[in-house]
Image (spheres, rainbow, N blue to C red):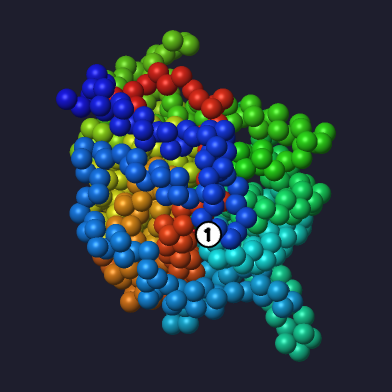
């Protein structure tokens, strides 16, 4: 028996949940233990889960854990892989300097590619894995320089044609122009006014706040976050996303292409990637805002928004077998507060693939929820960030990992990790992407496989106590990444082909691999990028969660 009445099933989940449920006092107690050879300054939640003995508690869904990872390879994976040295060399080659100081990394260092486009720029989102790699390696200065440089750029007046952008907008990317004759360096930046499709990067500001916390956590240096400039930068970003409007939902309304998926892919509305980053940035800001008059006012708004946002996401974006079955049987056209089908989703809009894809055990946050529209596609970044930020409850986090294990072929295949699943094709591709030749089925954003996502998968695996999944994914990447020249993405149903228009020496593919390796080796690094569950936010889950199936 494997259902709600099976006490073993519940116990298994509870022991798993305890990983993220350890509260401050539990961890503080564990901290009393003598330290093992740890040089860097660390706060309690940065401590190694393996040190805390939590790996012993790994939950085996349906007896599949520990699955075909040969013991020998698991043991050897902590030894430096020959690829690691190459990766560091390539990462250092991508450094960008401003007046002699490193301020970021270029998106791709691909000499063979005829068209540079904007891949010679420092992208805010792309720099995050580079920054984490440098922090984990004890080199925080470049991260500090980057945070200050982008904060400075945020202060510029931003216009698209005759329209002035919000003060808090952070750039998608910037470029340093060197003038060898005059010996000057100048910076140009793109807030969407040059980007293909003129998309504003909603994610940049969130990543900036998340990175500021990572820097603070990793170095113990509070002085940067506490400067009036950083406090103001955070407040400006927060003003943009906490402003009142006509919204009926606590989620953030966005245009298509406003995040990692930066061209038309039908993610407009309330994309999971942005909602998860929004949630994480709000929590990160809450921990860094000063308790002065302005700071207090923002904290109050953040707390209210977090409360509503977590309830909304955990209730309406969550999908598992039980929930799918409920939607399948929905009545429509219900009016009033008592409506079950609140968004008037028509059951016929459930795509056929989903009935086969949804395992009995497992679940995920779907791509988008708005009136009469549920985008049932699975998106990697949003689901991993939901785990890391504790937007997902411990049960939901475990269920997301269950789904990845159960649908390994579809989501990981031969190269981790699918950016979204499934691809859209034919008529739907024409309508949704606007016939985008770069986003054909199973390529690029449309079901392509992105090595950069390996670091997010690894972090999620460590947080949920399933490092063996990450180990297996990293081993897959190691069979090809270096040999193929660190491509930006892979194409095909299982990610077998180097992407049609993929850049080589894509920096975040390189940095993502290094971060994944370093985190697995020393799981205490996770604390930089992970937030423990806030118990006060715990909702009453009326719905099934996957373990009740
Ligand atoms: C592509 C990706 C985007 C990334 C940029 C630079 O446009 O879609 O997410 O930031 O390349 O690598």
Frontmost residue, 132 versus 159: 132
Q: Percent position (x, y) of residue 24? A: 57, 35
**Going by the image, does 152 lie left or right of 348?**
right
Q: Nearer the viewer, residue 93 or 19?
A: 19
Q: Position of residue 278 (x, y in %)?
A: 57, 41
Q: Is residue 272 above or below residue 153?
A: above
Where residue 508 sits in the image (x, y, percent)?
A: 48, 65
Please tell me in which quadrant of the rendered image residue 92 appears: bottom right
Give the number of marks: 1
Q: Nearer the viewer, residue 323 or 513?
A: 513
In-image side of 471 versus 297 (left or right): left
Q: Nearer the viewer, residue 199 or 316?
A: 316
Outermost residue to the front: 34
Q: Is residue 329 left or right of residue 51?
A: left
Q: In the figure, 481 relative to 167: above or below?
A: below
**Rendered position, 343 above or below 362:** above
> Most extreme residue toward the bottom, as rendered?
181
Residue 531 appears in the rendering? no
Around disc 1, counting alpha carbons within 10 Å, would you say few (fewer than 14), some (14 to 19), or many (20 or more)?
A: few
Residue at image point 24% right, 58% down: 71
> In the rendering, at what x and y percent does residue 177 appear?
69, 77
In the rendered image, which quarter contains the N terminus?
top left
SS for dot 1? loop
Write down the residue under mark 1: 37
Residue at (30% x, 45% y) in the render = 404
Give me the residue at 47% from left, 33% from top: 21
Q: Is residue 19 left or right of residue 403?
A: right
């Amino acid at each position: 028996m494997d259902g709600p009445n099976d006490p073993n099933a519940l116990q298994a989940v509870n022991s798993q949940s305890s990983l993220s449920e350890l509260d401050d006092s539990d961890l503080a107690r564990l901290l009393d233990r003598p330290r093992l050879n740890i040089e860097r300054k660390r706060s309690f939640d940065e401590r190694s889960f393996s040190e805390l003995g939590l790996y012993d508690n790994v939950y085996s869904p349906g007896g599949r854990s520990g699955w075909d990872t040969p013991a020998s390879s698991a043991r050897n994976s902590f030894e430096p892989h020959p690829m690691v040295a190459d990766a560091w060399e390539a990462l250092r080659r991508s450094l960008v300097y401003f007046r002699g100081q490193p301020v970021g990394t270029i998106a791709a260092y691909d000499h063979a590619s005829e068209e540079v486009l904007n891949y010679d720029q420092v992208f805010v989102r792309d720099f995050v894995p580079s920054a984490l790699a440098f922090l984990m390696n004890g080199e925080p200065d470049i991260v500090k320089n980057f945070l200050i440089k982008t904060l400075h750029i945020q202060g510029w007046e931003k216009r698209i044609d005759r329209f002035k952008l919000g003060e808090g907008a952070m750039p998608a990317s910037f470029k340093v122009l060197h003038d060898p004759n005059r010996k000057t360096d100048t910076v140009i930046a793109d807030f969407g006014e040059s980007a293909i499709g003129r998309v504003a990067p909603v994610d940049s500001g969130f990543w900036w706040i998340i990175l500021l916390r990572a820097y603070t956590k990793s170095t113990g240096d509070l002085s940067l976050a506490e400067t009036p400039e950083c406090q103001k930068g955070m407040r400006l970003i927060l003003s943009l996303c906490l402003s009142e409007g006509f919204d009926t939902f606590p989620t953030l309304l966005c245009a298509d292409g406003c995040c990692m998926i930066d061209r038309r892919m039908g993610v407009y509305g309330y994309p999971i990637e942005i909602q998860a980053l929004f949630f994480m940035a709000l929590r990160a800001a809450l921990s860094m805002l000063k308790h002065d008059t302005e700071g207090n006012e923002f904290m109050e708004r953040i707390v209210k928004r977090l409360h509503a946002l977590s309830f909304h996401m955990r209730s309406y974006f969550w999908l598992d077998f039980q929930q799918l079955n409920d939607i399948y049987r929905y009545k429509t056209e219900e009016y009033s507060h008592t409506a079950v089908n609140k968004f008037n989703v028509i059951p016929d809009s459930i795509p056929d693939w989903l009935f086969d894809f949804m395992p009995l055990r497992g679940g995920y946050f779907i791509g988008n929820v708005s009136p009469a529209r549920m985008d049932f596609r699975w998106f990697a970044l949003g689901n991993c960030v939901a785990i890391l930020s504790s937007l997902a409850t411990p049960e939901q986090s475990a269920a997301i990992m269950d789904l990845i294990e159960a649908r390994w072929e579809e989501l990981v295949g031969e190269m981790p990790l699918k950016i979204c699943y499934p691809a859209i094709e034919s008529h739907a591709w024409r309508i949704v992407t606007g016939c985008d030749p770069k986003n054909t089925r199973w390529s690029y954003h449309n079901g392509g496989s992105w090595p950069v996502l390996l670091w997010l998968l690894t972090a999620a695996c460590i947080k949920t106590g399933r490092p063996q999944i990450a180990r297996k994914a990293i081993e897959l990447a190691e069979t090809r990444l270096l040999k193929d020249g660190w491509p930006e993405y892979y194409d095909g149903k299982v990610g077998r082909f180097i992407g049609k228009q993929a850049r080589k020496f894509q920096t975040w593919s390189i940095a993502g691999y290094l971060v994944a390796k370093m985190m697995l080796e020393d799981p205490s690094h996770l604390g930089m990028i992970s937030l423990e569950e806030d118990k006060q936010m715990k909702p009453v889950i009326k719905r099934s969660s996957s373990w009740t199936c």
